[in-house]
């Protein structure tokens, strides 16, 4: 398991829980998970936890000789700053423009000079809808 995969599992965990203790929560984090390299997977989870700590998402505290990783603030309030290049902006605006034309819905058009989180969510919703339609048509 890669650190990226472990990070995704942990983010899903912290979406539902405020803290993580390796000894108490590892099996719950990965239920029914069979691995050929369980020690390497544990190392991957620990690396991902350290990365979350370095990115100030969690803080580690030792209680009774066990490490607890605790969210610094509620998961819903966490944000990231992202820089988006103009090639990506053009793709985002093209997706919304074409979808707007196909659905006759101009509400989904985005301002290419002021991309917001709402705009990203609109594009993701378009892509998720298209993916579901594609799966259903196969």
Image: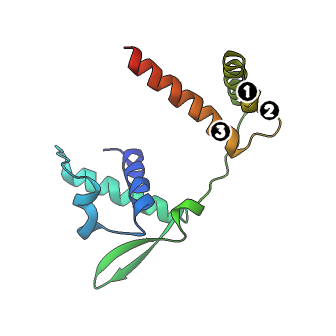
**Place of residue 128 in the rendered image (x, y in percent of width and height, measured from the top left):** 51, 30
Question: Quarter holding the N terminus?
Answer: top left
On residue 120, which mark appears?
A: 3
Name the residue that disc number 1 marks: 93
Q: Is residue 67 shown left or right of residue 23?
A: right
Sequence order check: which comes first, mark 2 or mark 1?
A: 1
Using the numbered discs, state the Cα–Cα distance from disc 1 to disc 3 in whole angstroms: 10 Å
Q: Secondary structure at mark 1?
A: helix
Query: Residue at horizontal 53%, vertical 67%?
Result: 74
Is the residue 128 above or below the residue 72 in the image?
above
The answer to which quarter of the image holds residue 138 is: top left
**Place of residue 60 in the rendered image (x, y in percent of width and height, measured from the top left):** 43, 74
Q: Secondary structure at mark 2?
A: loop
Query: Residue at horizontal 47%, vertical 59%?
Result: 51
Say if mark 2 contacts mark 1, CB within 8 Å: yes
On residue 112, which mark appears?
A: 2
In this orientation, which residue lies closer to the viewer: 2 or 77?
Answer: 77
Query: Residue at horizontal 73%, vertical 25%?
Result: 90
Q: Is residue 106 shown left or right of residue 2?
A: right
Q: Is residue 30 shown left or right of residue 132?
A: left
Q: Residue furthest front?
A: 104
Q: Secondary structure at mark 3?
A: helix
The answer to which quarter of the image holds residue 107 is: top right
Q: Is residue 53 shown left or right of residue 88?
A: left
Sequence order check: which comes first, mark 1 or mark 3?
A: 1
């Amino acid at each position: 398991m890669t650190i990226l995969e472990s990070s995704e599992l942990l983010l899903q965990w912290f979406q539902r829980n405020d803290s993580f203790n390796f000894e108490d929560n590892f099996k719950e984090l990965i239920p029914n998970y069979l691995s050929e390299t369980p020690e390497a997977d544990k190392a991957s989870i620990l690396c991902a936890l350290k990365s979350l700590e370095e990115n100030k998402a969690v803080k580690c505290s030792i209680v009774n000789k066990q490490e607890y990783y605790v969210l610094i603030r509620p998961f819903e309030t966490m944000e990231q700053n992202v820089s988006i290049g103009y090639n990506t902006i053009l793709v985002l605006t093209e997706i919304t423009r074409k979808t707007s034309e196909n659905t006759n819905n101009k509400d989904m058009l985005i301002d290419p000079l002021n991309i917001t989180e709402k705009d990203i969510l609109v594009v993701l919703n378009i892509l998720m809808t298209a993916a579901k339609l594609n799966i259903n048509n196969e």
